[in-house]
């Protein structure tokens, strides 16, 4: 954050001037301009002309555009101009002021600063307030309403057909979201969507777009169509990390079409923006003995993580592209430097595509540049599996140059047929539908009816050179108490020696990553618990066999509702230490010769075998 500067005024009043404005006269600009926390401080000029030249006002400019005029009563006063929040979009701005004299306007004095505001992550909008105003959504027309009778559950945001709109573009735009301090992990946009359709024309669309304060442009992440008519609530899960990590951003839903009368309404509900950590821990297991509990878990991801990127919807539509005759061409999906900015030091390691012609030959290809200019990979595909996704590793991982475009696709030579698989569309034009067919074009440029994206995906392996640190948080539950943070370790295992045998402990583990002051804690693992129980075999399930006392010293009492045939006792290494063959409902087992520790007891009855864990404490 910039330090606040103070105005120091050196006022020189020039007396006795009688000349008015003329060439060569000097009309001083403001002495200093400083923007800080929504306030623009304007210091008076270091010197002032005398009568008849009078300082009467200041003109304020933001990003070279006139913004406001402030009348000045005393020319030696410092002026604080407060921007009505939020008068400016978040992001970097240039703030300037010019001194307005009764005879002239001075040169400008300027400051640059970043305007920061917005909701923090996670952000949830379920429309329960019944208004757009509560969380400051901005609809561009009255066709956007809150529908109290529809939702998942009700209410929901609705784009309604009435009043009927022709050749329209109408937006529902969010308030800014501040993710400036989010430097690790992914950012997801989840929402529910449905459509009530009248005529399935394919012309009525709902787009999902993201804007950020760096690019200052809207980028489309998904488009939904009325091509197949109405559909019930669909859960949508979009990775918008490309444009949102470490930025201020906004989301908008954009309804477009030729004739809104072809639909009844789009509905949007349960909008959820949140950060997900890179790494995860799973499969927590617990090994026990009388002195300690040992935890082990599996680590997924972390500082090195993987991301499949693509423009298609992930499905093959049953359609494929070709000429039906012998032909040779390239297909590709393209990403710009702006879209690749979220992947520092990334490598393309795998390509997945959908071949459709068994007589064709395919070569994986990767290019860079705006043309594209440079072919980096030309790798033959041996025995492609036709009619399904083929996921293939590159023989050499290719580093991503974030300063130029990345093109990923394949070359096809075919004597017949339609060899290149596509999704159902609509096309993410100029990104998901590039084709080298007598030169590079989009599919829509080649044929306006080919409104599809290629079935092409590539895997980026991202390795941050300044790897976030990571460690593991251990949470422990004693008895029926709540889970509490217990300890932290940098190892993928943990030994808890601070245990009391008569207590029962459960554990969960999370991964915590940290970098540049940002921390991100993953979701917890499964719960792993000791098997120790007090008085019964399965206190949460079955009361038909009871063992007591626990802990035991010399004797274990075992009672069953069914006749017991056999009792066995094992130590933690699985070695049998006692065996009793009996035929009654009650039995007292002598454990006086066993050492203190944890043991397993099995009780076999006519119907089943029961297992329990007991503590023997001398």
Image (cartoon, grey):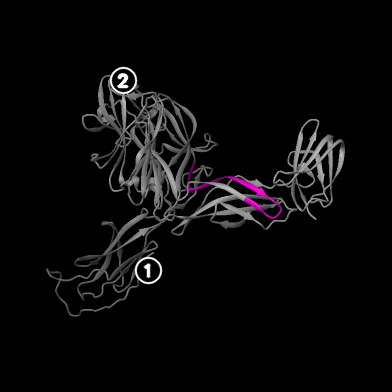
Whole-number angstrom distance, CA of label 2 to CA of label 1: 67 Å
Q: Is residue 393 magenta?
A: no
Identify whether 159 is placed above or below 230: below
Q: Within the image, what quadrant is residue 140 found in? A: top left
Answer with left or right where residue 554 lies relative to residue 334.
right
Q: Which of 294 and 574 is in front in this view?
A: 574
Q: Within the image, what quadrant is residue 219 found in? A: top left
Identify whether 7 is placed above or below 84: below
Q: Which of 177 and 445 is in front in this view?
A: 445
Q: What stretch is highlighted in magenta?
A: 271-294
Q: Mark 1 points at which residue?
A: 3
Q: Residue 75 at what x, y percent from top left?
A: 28, 72
Q: Is residue 272 magenta?
A: yes
Note whether residue 485 is visible: yes
Q: Residue 350 at what x, y percent from top left?
A: 38, 38
Answer with left or right where residue 541 lies relative to residue 366.
right
Q: Which of 106 and 323 is in front in this view?
A: 323
Q: Name the residue under label 2.
A: 417
Q: What residue sits 23% from the left and 79% below the top? A: 13
Does the magenta stretch mainly form a helix, a strand or a loop? strand
SS label for mark 2? loop
Q: What residue sits 73% from the left and 54% below the top? A: 501
- Mark 1 surroundings: few (<14), some (14-19) or many (≥20) residues within 10 A: few
Q: Residue 88 at what x, y percent from top left?
A: 36, 55
Q: Residue 492 at what x, y percent from top left?
A: 55, 51
Q: Earlier in the sequence, mark 2 or mark 1?
A: 1
Q: Within the image, what quadrant is residue 28 found in? A: bottom left
Q: Nearer the viewer, residue 51 or 356?
A: 356
Query: Which quadrant, please, contains the C terminus?
Result: bottom right
Identify whether 348 is placed above or below 553: above
């Amino acid at each position: 954050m910039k330090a606040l500067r103070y105005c120091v005024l050196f006022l020189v009043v020039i007396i006795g001037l009688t000349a008015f404005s003329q060439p060569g006269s000097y009309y001083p600009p403001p002495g200093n301009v400083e923007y800080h926390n929504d306030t623009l401080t304007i210091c008076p000029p270091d010197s002032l002309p005398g009568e008849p030249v009078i300082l009467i006002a200041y003109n304020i400019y933001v990003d070279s555009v006139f913004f406001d005029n402030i009348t000045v009563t005393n020319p030696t006063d410092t002026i604080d101009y407060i921007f009505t929040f939020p008068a400016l979009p978040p992001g970097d701005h240039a703030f300037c002021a010019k001194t307005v004299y009764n005879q002239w306007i001075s040169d400008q004095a300027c400051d640059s600063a970043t305007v920061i505001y917005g909701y923090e992550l996670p952000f949830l909008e379920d429309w329960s307030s019944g208004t757009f105003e509560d969380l400051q959504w901005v609809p561009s027309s009255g066709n956007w309403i809150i529908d109290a009778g529809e939702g998942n559950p009700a209410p929901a945001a609705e784009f309604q057909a009435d009043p009927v709109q022709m050749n329209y573009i109408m937006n529902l735009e969010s308030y800014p979201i501040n993710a400036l301090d989010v430097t690790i992990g992914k950012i997801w946009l989840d929402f529910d969507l449905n459509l009530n359709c009248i005529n399935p024309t394919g012309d009525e669309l709902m787009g999902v777009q993201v804007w950020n304060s760096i690019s200052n442009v809207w980028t489309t992440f998904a488009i939904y169509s009325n091509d197949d008519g109405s559909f019930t609530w669909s859960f949508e899960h979009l990775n918008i990390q490309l444009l949102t990590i470490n930025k201020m951003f906004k989301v908008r839903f954009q309804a477009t079409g030729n004739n809104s009368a072809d639909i009844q309404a789009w509905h949007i509900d349960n909008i959820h923006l949140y950060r997900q950590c890179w790494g995860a821990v799973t499969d927590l297991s617990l090994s026990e003995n009388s002195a300690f509990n040992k935890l082990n878990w599996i680590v997924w991801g972390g500082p090195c993580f993987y991301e499949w990127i693509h423009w298609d919807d992930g499905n093959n539509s049953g359609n494929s592209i070709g000429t039906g005759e012998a032909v040779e061409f390239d297909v590709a999906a393209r990403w710009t430097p702006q879209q690749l900015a979220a992947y520092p030091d990334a490598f393309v390691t795998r390509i997945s595509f959908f071949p459709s012609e068994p007589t064709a030959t395919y070569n994986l290809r990767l290019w860079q540049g705006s043309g594209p200019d440079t072919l980096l990979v030309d790798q033959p595909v041996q025995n492609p599996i036709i009619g399904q996704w083929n996921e293939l590793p590159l023989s050499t991982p290719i580093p991503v140059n974030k300063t130029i475009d990345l093109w990923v696709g394949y070359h096809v030579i075919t004597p017949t047929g339609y060899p290149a698989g596509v999704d159902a569309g609509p096309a993410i034009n100029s990104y998901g539908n590039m084709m080298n067919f007598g030169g590079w074009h989009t599919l829509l440029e080649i044929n306006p009816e080919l409104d599809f994206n290629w079935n092409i995906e590539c895997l980026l392996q991202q390795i941050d050179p300044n790897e976030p640190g990571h460690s593991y948080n251990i949470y422990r539950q004693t008895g029926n108490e709540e889970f509490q943070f217990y300890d932290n370790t940098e190892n993928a295992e943990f030994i808890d020696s601070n245990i009391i045998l008569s207590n029962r402990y459960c554990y969960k583990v999370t991964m915590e990553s940290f970098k540049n002051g940002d921390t991100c804690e993953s979701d917890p693992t499964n719960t792993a618990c000791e098997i120790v129980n007090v008085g019964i075999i399965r206190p949460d399930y079955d009361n038909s066999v009871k063992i007591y006392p626990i802990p035991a010293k010399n004797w274990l009492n075992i009672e069953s509702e069914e006749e017991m045939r056999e009792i066995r006792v094992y130590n933690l290494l699985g070695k049998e230490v006692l065996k009793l063959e009996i035929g009654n409902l009650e039995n007292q087992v002598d454990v006086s010769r066993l050492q203190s520790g944890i043991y397993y007891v099995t009780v076999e009855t006519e119907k089943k075998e029961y297992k329990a864990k007991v503590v023997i404490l001398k």
